[in-house]
Amino acid sequence: TVSTQSNGNIRMKFAERVENLPPYLFVGISQAIAAKKALGIEVISFGIGDPDMQTPAPVLDALVAGSKKAANHKYPETEGLPEFRARVAKFYDDRFGVKLDPATEVINLIGAKEGIAHAALCFIDPGDISISPDPAYPVYEIGTMFAGGTTHFVTLKEGNGYLVDFSDIPTDVAKKAKTLWINYPNNPTGAIAPLSFFDEAVKYCKEFDIALLHDAAYTEVTYDGYVAPSVLQAEGAMDIAMEFHSLSKTANMTGWRVGFASGNPDMVNALMRVKSNIDSGLSQANQEMGIAALDLPSEWIDDNNEVYQKRRDKVVSVLNEIGVPAVAPKGALYIWTPIPKGYSSAEFAKKLLDEVNVVVTPGNGYGPGGEGYIRLSLTIPDDQIDEGLRRLAQLRVNS
Ligand SMILES: *Cc1c(COP(=O)(O)O)cnc(C)c1O
């Protein structure tokens, strides 16, 4: 359907999936920052999770070298270079003790987000149900919606350590559901899951014949010596699970879009078939960057995480001083905290912006279960963190 706007231009009617898209979470925040800037006020933004530190030199060197190889000037294979997939299999073996066949159980991704969104096309037909945590990374729901399905949300409760409580899912929903999304270390809550939780998730999904999809973007971003497990370590996981990994947060590579999925070979193959009809994989030079990132010494990862850990401790301490009961997370890049009574998430975020020119993300941006919380990201430079905290310390919270 087309109609004519008053200015004479044709107004196109877009597909429902586009018309119904919620505004991107950070659009509102960007507008608020721009409005302050227009008044000559510099805001400090704890809003967006995008590492401020540089991609490490060996990874950039791999891009430069890779750009000069004639073979890399051509279409890549959708599933990725054999060398890349073999390096991912070695990572799983070294890091998790999980043996993967690189030929059939690993596929590369143009960032984990791409794979997460496209995974829905492998499992969800119009009218199908996906189960997603609430609050959550928004892409689980959007991917399902694009595939014509609907999402049943299961609230992550603070009292349950923000783990999915499977007894909260009605049996008739579980019987109909095609996919279950989980994500630990978790964005936005910073929660971690023990391997026993993954065992429980696998058992649950097997009982109801549900594809278990684990977003593992933060398994390498952890603190206080905590080592995160992979869902593929769980008993029987290779029968029904696929895990999505990203080098974006681990190695400051959001700009280079290197991710991978691994797990059950039929599930990996389905994703390969979907992707081969939509994209032609990740540029091979970028895959070579991915190999270099997986080759980084563990000390590099530790040092990078150490920077976030120091920021985490500073932020938590100032929040506690002003009456916000934040707790230091063991993983991911965020402080997720309940806000003082008497405010909604949006009201409290607005108070911070109005009174001290600090931007935080209102928790309800990650789903209704996030109401009553805010999220602060640790991915801003230390001098800005310090200035942001100096401002926060001046805040008067009525509690
Ligand atoms: C950042 C993030 C991703 C996206 O990773 P890319 O590889 O950059 O696409 C996926 N899941 C979660 C939970 C994230 O926070």
Image (spheres, grey):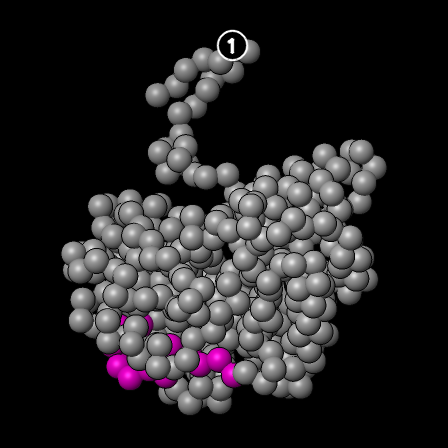
* Residue 81 visible in the displayed image: no
Residue 221 image offset from top left, x and y in percent: 57, 74
- Quarter of the view holding residue 67: bottom right
Left or right of 163 on screen, residue 185: right
Quadrant of the frame with the N terminus: top left
Q: How many residues crowd mark 1 within 10 Å: few (<14), some (14–19), many (20+)? A: few
Q: Name the residue under label 1.
A: 6
Q: Which of 263 and 281 is in front in this view?
A: 263
Residue 45 image offset from top left, x and y in percent: 70, 51
Which region is colored magenta?
A: 227-241
Q: Nearer the viewer, residue 191 or 59?
A: 191
Above or below — where is 177 with respect to 228? above
Which residue extends farthest right? 40
Residue 12 image offset from top left, x and y in percent: 43, 23
Left or right of 391 on screen, residue 99: left
In magenta stretch: residue 11: no
Q: Which residue is drawn at 54% across and 83% down?
A: 226
Q: Residue at x 62, y 86 (%)?
A: 298
Left or right of 13 on screen, residue 341: right
Above or below — where is 3 with respect to 132? above
Please name the amino acid that badge 1 sits on: Ser
Which residue extends farthest front? 399
Above or below — where is 110 with respect to 328? above
Left or right of 91 on screen, residue 277: left
Q: Which residue is drawn at 31% across and 79% down?
A: 199
- Please tell me whether mark 1 sits on a helix, a strand or a loop: loop
Q: Which of 98 and 334 is in front in this view?
A: 334
- Judge: label 1 CB < 8 Å from ligand 1: no
* Residue 112 visible in the displayed image: yes
Q: Which residue is drawn at 64% across and 80% down?
A: 301
In magenta stretch: residue 233: yes
